[in-house]
Image (tube, grey):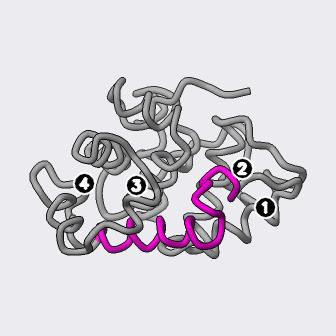
């Protein structure tokens, strides 16, 4: 069970997220300190500038040249140069640990194991890993045993907490309202 992604709120960017595991993972990496739909458009910007998304090419790219590419307007992130380093570190990790196969990260029979693998990724902490696990389960059909429990509250059915729950413009608004209310409660 997979759904048609609508995270970036842009058909071309969403099509890339849907078809390319690396694009989806990079979108999640970029999802901080900027609106989520802007973050998830970042991989499409890289795709257009590089002529594709090749994990090995990004991992081996000259760091200064890659930072320039990422920061060129429209940048992949508000902090384009800084995030370029994180993108490269993530791609280097995927090459070293998973032989360049991004989807191998979540190829496991156990939700807790997938969560452990996600938490080990550069730029992914506990919360980001749980959100991404929920996104995989809710929208990409990646449902290893125990995934909902491993994803915590982000895995709850019917929740409107994170990018894992964004399926259209309405649900994007609901997620934003939840985040705003949670921030106010803190």
- Give the dominant element type of the magenta stretch: helix, strand or loop: helix
Instruction: Please identify the quarter of the rendering in which residue 94 is found.
Output: bottom right
Q: Which mark is residue 155?
A: 2
Label 4 near label 3: C-beta < 8 Å? no
The residue sitting at 38% across, 58% down in the picture is 57
Say which residue label 4 marks. Answer: 76
Q: Which of the marked residues, 3 or 2, is nearer the chain's N terminus?
A: 2
How far apart are the alpha carbons under marks 1 and 4?
30 Å
How far apart are the alpha carbons under marks 1 and 2?
8 Å
Label 1 crowd bin: few (<14), some (14–19), many (20+), radius 10 Å:
many
Secondary element at image label 2: helix
How far apart are the alpha carbons under marks 3 and 4?
24 Å
Label 3 crowd bin: few (<14), some (14–19), many (20+), radius 10 Å:
few
Q: Quadrant of the N terminus?
A: top right
- Seen in the picture, residue 121 relative to 181 is either above or below; the reply is below
Q: Which of the marked residues, 1 or 3, is nearer the chain's N terminus?
A: 1
Q: Which mark is residue 150?
A: 1
The residue sitting at 50% across, 46% down in the picture is 24
Q: Which of the marked residues, 3 or 4, is nearer the chain's N terminus?
A: 4
Label 4 near label 1: C-beta < 8 Å? no
Specify whether residue 49 is painted magenta.
no
Q: Percent from the top left, x then y, of residue 74?
A: 13, 48
Q: Which of the marked residues, 1 or 2, is nearer the chain's N terminus?
A: 1
The residue sitting at 64% across, 71% down in the picture is 97
* Residue 186 in sight here: no
Q: Percent from the top left, x then y, of residue 106?
A: 72, 54
Say which residue label 3 marks. Answer: 180
Instruction: Please identify the quarter of the rendering in which residue 146 is found.
Output: bottom right
Q: Which of the marked residues, 1 or 4, is nearer the chain's N terminus?
A: 4
Label 2 near label 1: C-beta < 8 Å? yes
Taking depth in this image into account, of 105 and 180 the one nearest to the observer is: 105
């Amino acid at each position: 069970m997979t759904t048609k992604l609508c995270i970036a709120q842009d058909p071309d960017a969403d099509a890339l997220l849907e078809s390319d595991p690396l694009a989806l993972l990079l979108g999640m990496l970029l999802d901080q300190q900027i609106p989520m739909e802007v973050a998830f458009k970042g991989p499409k910007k890289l795709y257009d500038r590089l002529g594709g998304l090749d994990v090995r090419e990004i991992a081996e790219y000259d760091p200064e040249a890659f930072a320039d590419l990422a920061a060129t307007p429209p940048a992949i992130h508000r902090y384009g140069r800084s995030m370029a380093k994180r993108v490269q570190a993530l791609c280097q990790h995927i090459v070293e640990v998973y032989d360049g196969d991004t989807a191998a990260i979540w190829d496991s029979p156990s939700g807790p194991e997938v969560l452990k693998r996600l938490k080990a990724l550069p730029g992914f902490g506990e919360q980001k890993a749980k959100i991404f696990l929920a996104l995989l389960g809710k929208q990409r059909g990646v449902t290893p045993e125990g995934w909902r429990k491993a994803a915590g509250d982000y895995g709850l059915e019917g929740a409107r907490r994170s990018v894992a729950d964004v399926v259209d413009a309405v649900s994007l608004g609901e997620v934003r309202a939840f985040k705003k209310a949670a921030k106010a409660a803190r």
